[in-house]
Amino acid sequence: MLGAASAFIECTLAQIYKTRSEDGTYIGGQAYYAERALGIKWFGTAMAVILVGSNVFGNPCVQSNTISTAVANAFQIPAWIVGLAIAGAMALVVFGGIRRLAALAEKIVPTMCIVYLTIAVILIGANFAKLPGAIGLIFSSAFNPRSAFGGMMGTALVWGVRRGVYSNEAGQGTGTAPAAAADADNPCDQGLVQALSVYIDTLVVCTISALCMLCTNCYNVLGVDGSMVVEYLPGLPDGIPYVQSAIASVLPLGEIIVAFLITTFAFTSLMSYYLEAEIHIEYLTMKLPSALQKTILNALRLCFLFMVFISSSWPVTRVWNITDIGGGVLTWAHLTLLVIICGPAVKALRSYDKQRKAGVEHPVFDPVALGIKNADLWTEINKEKGRWLQP
């Protein structure tokens, strides 16, 4: 619930304080609403610096490592070769028009998600007799007194929070640039969609993935002291190979199918991270000479591609440690910001809810009527669409 609430607030704020570029597309994100909601330029600058650092040197590592691990497990290809291929593909994206490919990704990812969920449901159905035991194992392991006193419960909670935040990115603000780019009729429309996605991602996709592994005994459990508590898959690296093994237990070529799906998911996530970083580099350099702007942007691209390549062959523990540092700094800074500036989003929601209860099918967002400053673009949008908030 906290994740959904923070996702709603951040994406609604991204819509409220977005701007329009010369080509007519919308631009926004946490740096934009940090500056405009507070009226303090340096706050927006600080948030942009933190986000660029996290999205270049932290978040891409997990996605690149996940792709290389999945492909290496399916085709027995060295991880560094996979990493080189990922970096090469990303180079085509970052130097050749990421916004066009991002639009394409919006159409591909939902389809791939449906395919994955369908396969997972088939797997669970084939092992339906084991489903009650798998669900029981989750609860018995979580609330077992021996787990609590042995430190396992605390470890599980810590890992659950860290991975849960990363899976849906709620609170990090890394999804605010795509949210700002949406052509929404009301900022709350985009905020509610983002809030719903938290439940779909964490409660549905992650839970089903866990049940796939538990129903097929395709997992290992490492104890607090580093010893192996459960080892059903000796020698297999942590992470996506567990899901690949589970799918392969009921579906021929399961490792290859999962590798393809994961590559699609992770690669589009890499595009999203880069897009967010590019938008905030443009924010930081908007007043610099154009030649210097281009040099800084190219340096950003090279750093991003280097991290994509080198992290592909890192041990998974190193990948997550680096990602946790970058993501942790970003999340704490951004959540602090949301607590300070959540007021405009709350006003927008109250107005939205009031209009919906009054039978208005498409609630209007009028920043002037709501007393929200520095949201001038919405005044222009309302004029263009001939829409105003009725008293």
Image: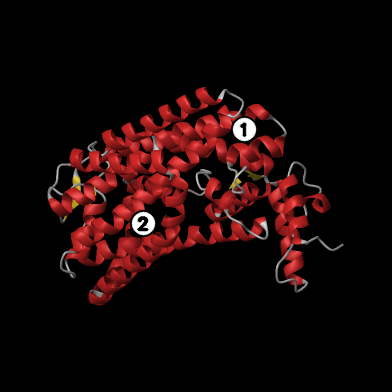
| Residue extending farthest right | 391
* Residue 6 seen in render: no
Q: Earlier in the sequence, mark 2 or mark 1?
A: 1
Q: Residue 228: image x %, image y %?
A: 18, 46
Q: Quadrant of residue 357?
A: bottom right
Q: Residue at x 55, y 56 (%)?
A: 4
Q: Nearer the viewer, residue 222 or 22?
A: 22
Quadrant position of residue 249: bottom left
Q: Nearer the viewer, residue 38 or 238?
A: 38
- Number of the front mark, 2 or 1: 1
Q: Is residue 104 left or right of residue 130?
A: right
Check contact, mark 2 vs mark 1: CB within 8 A.
no
**Local crowd at mark 2 within 10 Å, few (<14), some, or many (≥20)?**
some
Residue 303, how many percent across, how many down? 37, 30
Is residue 238 visible to us here?
Answer: yes
- In the image, what residue type sits under mark 1? Gly
Task: Give the left or right position of residue 46, taking residue 155 as reference.
Answer: right
Name which residue lies at 41% across and 46% down: 271
Q: Amino acid at mark 2?
A: Ala
Q: Is residue 172 left or right of residue 43?
A: left
Residue 172: give x, y in percent of width and height: 51, 43
Q: Quadrant of the C terminus?
A: bottom right
The residue that disc 2 covers is 142
Q: CA distance from mark 2 to mark 1?
A: 41 Å
The residue depicted at 39 percent of the width and 60 percent of the height is: 109
In the picture of the structure, the residue carrying the numbered disc 1 is 44
The colour scheme applied to this rendered structure is secondary structure
Q: Secondary structure at mark 1?
A: helix
